[in-house]
Amino acid sequence: MNLYFIIIVLILLSVVSLFVYFKFKDRELLKTVTNLNRGTKSERKMVLKILKSGIKSTAIFHDIYLSNGNGKYSQIDLVVATNVGIVVFEIKEYRGWIFGNENQINWTQILAYGKKKYKFYNPILQNKKHVEDLKKLYHFDGIPIFSVIVFFGDCELKNSINLPSRTFLTKSNKVMNRFNEILESNQLVNFENKWEIVNLLEQAVKNGENSIIRTKHIEDIKKLKMRKRFY
């Protein structure tokens, strides 16, 4: 009886040790790209997925604040520079049923069998704006930019959606399939201004470390929501 107990304890200790080890490895890997408390938990999970797929940490830019040149900033969850172009991720985390199409301004989250409903801004349009902001910068002229909207959490997308060109909408468990599809189905790109692009994105990451920029961006978003009644 005592022997069985000792064996069970040893097994449990081994399992816990392995869990702690892999957790530590993930934390160390994540720190090659971003801070452990930066962005949302889902964003950091997405960064780890990309890292574990073999993409170098120097090609991944998390939580960037892109200057629009008018004192305002566009906040983008995640940007990855690849051999076929730039991949821009918009990362969401929701539960319940999600209703909405490509053209609606607001989508609807439904919980508790329809008893609770919440509006949120169409993530396809949201990330489309992010892509447009990147294209305004001359360094990105002629470079393909792909929009990937990822839903984490126990949610179900209920509508059939006609996605625009170079746009992908997916749950988190299938996001790497979509990412690999982008890498495998598109031609290689010649980056004439590779280091200029890297420097610009690195600066956008540093912008996100500036508390003044972050605070002003939050205030600008609040004003936009009040003016356009986004939820």
Image: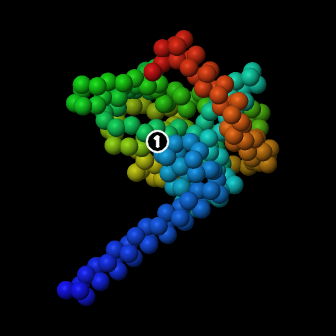
In the image, is residue 20 above or below residue 41? below
Looking at the rendered image, the quarter that the N terminus falls into is: bottom left
Furthest-front residue in this view: 2
Asked if residue 36 lies left or right of residue 120, the reply is right
Asked if residue 110 lies left or right of residue 206, the reply is left
Furthest-top residue in this view: 227
Looking at the rendered structure, the kind of residue marked 1 is Val
Q: Residue at x 62, y 45 (%)?
A: 62
Q: Residue at x 74, y 32 (%)?
A: 137
All told, the count of numbered labels is 1
In the image, is residue 82 above or below residue 105? below
The kind of secondary structure element at disc 1 is: strand
Is residue 78 in view from this perspective? no
Asked if residue 127 lies left or right of residue 4, the reply is right
Q: Position of residue 149 (x, y in %)?
A: 49, 38
Looking at the rendered image, the quarter that the C terminus falls into is: top left
In the image, is residue 213 above or below residue 38? above
Is residue 218 in view from this perspective? yes
Asked if residue 188 lies left or right of residue 9, the reply is right
In the image, is residue 148 above or below residue 162? below
Q: Which residue is tagged 1? A: 150
Who is closer to the viewer here, 154 or 79? 154
Q: Position of residue 5 (x, y in %)?
A: 25, 81
Q: Position of residue 114 (x, y in %)?
A: 24, 26
Q: Residue at x 62, y 21 (%)?
A: 220
Q: Residue at x 52, y 17 (%)?
A: 225
Choose top left, top right, bottom left or bottom right for residue 17. Answer: bottom left
